[in-house]
Image: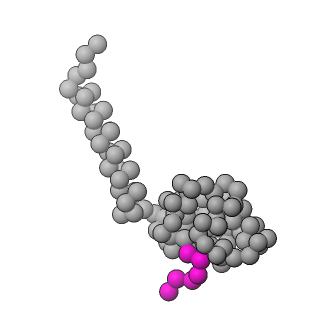
């Protein structure tokens, strides 16, 4: 079955839109998760609201880990928290701080 020109353009327009949306979000230009937060002082609601891919469950795990073991000394220490992996850490790297940002 042959596709019509209309189908061809609709498929390609959707594909292009998806690619542009991905690039826009990943570049940080259109990112809604751009707040810089101190994970050593932020509460669960703030962490889950401001960091990409972190919901309340993971935010609670971060706060519980911090309460049990003390402040995070390095950003990489977040990898010790259950549910936080390298990709999640990398995507949030520039927004995670360990001290208050002026």
Q: Position of residue 27 (x, y in %)?
A: 37, 60
Picture quarter containing residue 71? bottom right
Which residue, as the protein is rendered here, is positioned at the far top? 1
In the image, is residue 39 part of the stretch drawn in magenta?
no
The quadrant in which the N terminus is found is top left
Asked whether residue 1 is in view, the answer is: yes
Between 85 and 49, the residue placed more toward the observer is 85
12 relative to 79, above or below: above
Q: Which residue is drawn at the image coordinates 64% and 75% (left, top)?
A: 73
In-image side of 54 versus 66 (left or right): left
Between 36 and 6, the residue placed more toward the observer is 36
61 relative to 5, above or below: below
Decide whether the magenta segment is chiefly helix, strand or loop. loop
Q: Position of residue 100 (x, y in %)?
A: 57, 83
Q: Position of residue 76 (x, y in %)?
A: 60, 66
Q: Which residue is drawn at the image coordinates 67% and 59% (left, top)?
A: 58
Between 20 and 39, the residue placed more toward the observer is 39
**Residues rendered magenta in the picture:** 97-102
Q: Which residue is drawn at the image coordinates 40% and 57% (left, top)?
A: 26
Q: Position of residue 9 (x, y in %)?
A: 24, 33
| Number of marks in picture | 0
Which residue, as the protein is rendered here, is positioned at the far bottom? 102
Asked whether residue 55 is in view, the answer is: no
């Amino acid at each position: 079955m042959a596709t019509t020109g209309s189908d061809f353009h609709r498929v390609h327009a959707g594909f292009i839109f998806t690619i542009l949306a991905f690039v826009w979000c990943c570049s940080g230009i259109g990112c809604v998760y751009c707040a810089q937060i101190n994970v050593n002082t932020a509460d669960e609601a703030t962490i889950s609201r401001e960091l990409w891919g972190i919901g309340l469950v993971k935010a609670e795990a971060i706060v519980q880990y911090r309460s049990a073991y003390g402040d995070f000394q390095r950003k990489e220490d977040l990898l010790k928290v259950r549910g936080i992996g390298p990709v999640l850490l990398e995507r949030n790297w520039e927004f995670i701080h360990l001290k208050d940002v002026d």
